[in-house]
Amino acid sequence: MKYLIGLMLFMLSHIASAALAECQVDGGDWADAETTGFYVYVDVKASTSLKKVLLNYFSMNCRHKLSVDLLSSLKISTQPDAVKFSSDYSHLKGGLVSLGEYYPVPVQAGLSMGTHTTGPYVSVQGGPYLDITTTSDKYIDIKSGSHIASVYFKMRLSNLVLGVKNFETPVFVYARNALNLSPSTCTINDNDPINIDFGSVDPLAIGGDTSPGTPYRKSFVLNYSCPDAGISSPLDIKLVGTASSFNSKALTTTNPNLAAGLTRLSELVAPGSSFRTSITNSSGSDTVLFTLFRKAGSLPAAGPFTASGTLVMSVP
């Protein structure tokens, strides 16, 4: 018996689905908004008037690929919990600016993010922001190139043939530049040495206490400044040095019968102690007084003498 063997070939074809909506960032290539996550690099800027660090300096345009008619539309809004900060910045507060309004996290769903232009084009208006804070463990320190936040947009397409189609489009926001709003980068007098010269001193005229009658007092202005704008915070200024053996509230000098003190607001700042001050919009100042003290009953020996100390700025 003979058998007839037949071979059937099945032609399988793959039909690629065309993008229904596309987006471009900062004038780059158009990409499928349904399957692509968009990466944007922003100029990180502090706004002292708003007390916010703005992260919305990017342009994003989207368009639908539906037949252009009166019933075809693309709408862009927020997904639930639309802004999520990366782990490095999750301790900070912030939110999303949408069409000029600021919404703190968790950002609600349904906020309109797009304004229609001509034809099928929609321009995204907004982006994330961070609140400028004065809490000591929540100062903003953004590293260049770091991932700051992710924003999740809802794309809504509709027309007569398609009906309604919704999908999510994520935007990942990265820093183009660094921004440090911590007072740790601030300085006292630009870190220049503070030199107090009392000139020639009559040892018998040196007071033994803080009496304002002593002629050997020198006033000095301490200027506090920060390289980045927008820092407002309380500060502690600590005097680090060795206390005199006969006056614990003053610095020892190379002359054992002399001591040098620092006074602010009529109060001596003892070595190892500090005074509270502040900076506003990245600057501040204090006028302090340097005074000489003589050991009671002594006659300090003639000759030059020196004292040294260090002022340390910190956040309380």
Image (cartoon, rainbow, N blue to C red):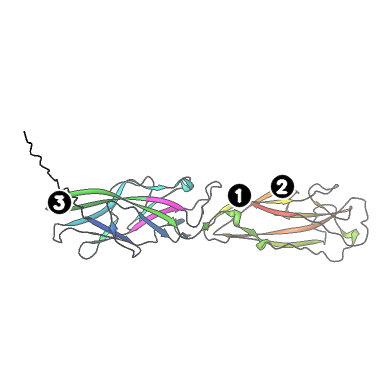
Instruction: Say few, some or many: other residues with alpha carbon within 10 Å of mark 3 (under 14 / 14 to 19 / 20 or more).
Output: few
What residue do we see at 30% from left, 50% from top?
78
Q: Which residue is mark 3?
A: 162
- Is 21 one of the magenta-colored residues? no
The residue that disc 1 covers is 315
- The single residue placed furthest to the left in the displayed view is 1
Outermost residue, top direction? 1
User: Viewed as shown, does residue 291 lie left or right of 311?
Assistant: right
Relative to the observer, which residue lies in front, 154 or 268?
154
Characterize the local packing of mark 1: few (<14), some (14-19) or many (20 or more) Cα atoms within 10 angstroms: some
Few, some or many C-alpha atoms within 10 Å of disc 2 (few <14, some 14-19, many ≥20)? some
Residue 273 marker: 2
Q: Dot 3 lies on which element?
A: loop
Q: Quadrant of residue 223?
A: bottom right
Please provide the residue range marked out in magenta. Answer: 123-150
Closest to the camera, between mark 1 and mark 2, is 1
User: Do the residues bearing badges 3 and 1 touch, measured as CB atoms within 8 Å?
Assistant: no
